[in-house]
Image (cartoon, rainbow, N blue to C red):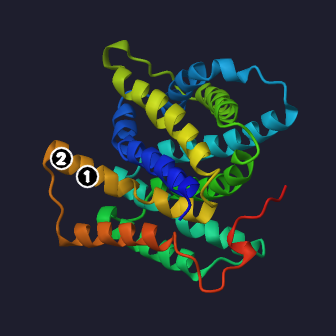
């Protein structure tokens, strides 16, 4: 494996590690704020960090950033709205369906993927299900969160192309701005619920600075070096990292089912990096418009 690919894997794993804590924080913030308010505040904070990199006059860069930002807005909005009705563990499971949706999307576009990706995708979904799926009846939140999985699959695919063409910092900054503006528009249709006494200051700062600004930037860096299907499998490590945090910080223990699920996901991430016996050029997402 090339050094550059190892570096890309490091970036993607770091982003996934930080994302592992976000489901609980968003769920907690929903006790005080509406979905649009949460996303507007977190992405407004993130946009401020990237303000110096927004002074770009490259029209192609802005088109790419706005397209990615629109996809990211849909992904975060549907996930946040979904968390109003479903549990954090169930949301994590449904969100990771993008690991299957992405190869299916590429297949519909006429591109073949090697067998390791399909095997890894199946193992990853099974592992996440064993690790975090709570088995409760379907609800409205599941449908909203399915929108997250589909939009994020398209986002991962498109980001691979744009991340290789544009610098990561301005590309990330434009995305943050687009999501903030979209969230502001959505927020205007919500009932105001601002409450200074119970305002989740720490949660929103963390979501803005770490889970949004830092993680989206790391993802852009990582996907310059790692193909989109492999990146999607790596992101399924999110519930594994979340479980590890719970183990070390909260002394929560995994049962046999959880350990098997975590093992499936780790195996999936390793298998996804293998090459098929007769690799095809189509294994890499094509650079299409």
Disc 1 + disc 2, Cβ < 8 Å: yes
Image coordinates of residue 285 in percent, x first then y, are 71, 64
Quarter containing the C terminus: bottom right
Q: Quadrant of residue 92?
A: bottom left
In the displayed orientation, state which residue is furthest to the top: 196
Q: Is residue 196 left or right of residue 118?
A: left
Give the SS element for disc 1. Answer: helix
Instruction: Report whether residue 134 is seen.
Output: no
Q: Which mark is residue 54?
A: none
Residue located at (44% from left, 18% from top): 194
**Depth check: 265 or 25 in front?**
265
Image coordinates of residue 56 in percent, x first then y, are 79, 24
Give the SS element for disc 2. Answer: helix
The residue carrying pointer 1 sits among few (fewer than 14), some (14 to 19) or many (20 or more) residues within 10 Å by Cα, namely some
Please state the total of marks drawn on the protein image: 2
Q: Classify 58 as above or below 276.
A: above
Q: Which residue is mark 1?
A: 244
In the displayed orientation, state which residue is furthest to the front: 3
Q: Which residue is mark 2?
A: 248
Instruction: Report whether residue 212 is seen.
Output: yes
Residue located at (17% from left, 67% from top): 255
**Depth check: 41 or 100 in front?**
100
Residue located at (44% from left, 60% from top): 236
């Amino acid at each position: 494996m090339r050094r550059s690919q190892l570096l890309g894997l490091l970036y993607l794993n770091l982003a996934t590690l930080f994302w592992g804590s976000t489901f609980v924080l968003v769920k907690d913030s929903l006790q005080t704020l509406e979905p649009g308010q949460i996303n507007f505040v977190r992405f407004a904070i993130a946009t401020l960090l990237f303000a110096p990199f927004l002074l770009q006059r490259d029209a192609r860069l802005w088109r790419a950033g706005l397209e990615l930002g629109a996809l990211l807005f849909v992904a975060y909005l549907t996930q946040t709205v979904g968390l109003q009705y479903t549990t954090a563990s169930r949301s994590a499971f449904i969100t990771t369906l993008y690991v299957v949706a992405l190869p299916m999307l590429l297949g519909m576009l006429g591109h073949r993927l090697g067998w390791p990706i399909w095997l890894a995708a199946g193992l990853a979904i099974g592992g996440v299900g064993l690790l975090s799926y709570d088995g409760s009846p379907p609800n409205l939140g599941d449908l909203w969160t399915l929108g997250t999985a589909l939009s994020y699959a398209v986002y991962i695919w498109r980001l691979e192309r744009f991340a290789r063409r544009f610098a990561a910092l301005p590309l990330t900054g434009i995305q943050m701005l687009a999501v903030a503006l979209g969230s502001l528009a959505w927020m205007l249709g919500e009932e105001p619920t601002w409450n200074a006494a119970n305002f989740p200051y720490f949660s929103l700062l963390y979501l803005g600075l770490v889970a949004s600004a830092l993680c989206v930037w790391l993802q852009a860096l990582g996907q310059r070096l790692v193909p989109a299907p492999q990146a999607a499998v790596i992101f399924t490590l999110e519930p594994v990292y979340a479980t590890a945090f719970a183990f070390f910080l909260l002394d929560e223990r995994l049962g046999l089912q959880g350990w098997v699920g975590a093992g499936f996901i780790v195996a999936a991430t390793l298998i996804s990096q293998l090459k098929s016996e007769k690799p095809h050029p189509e294994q890499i997402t094509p650079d299409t418009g």
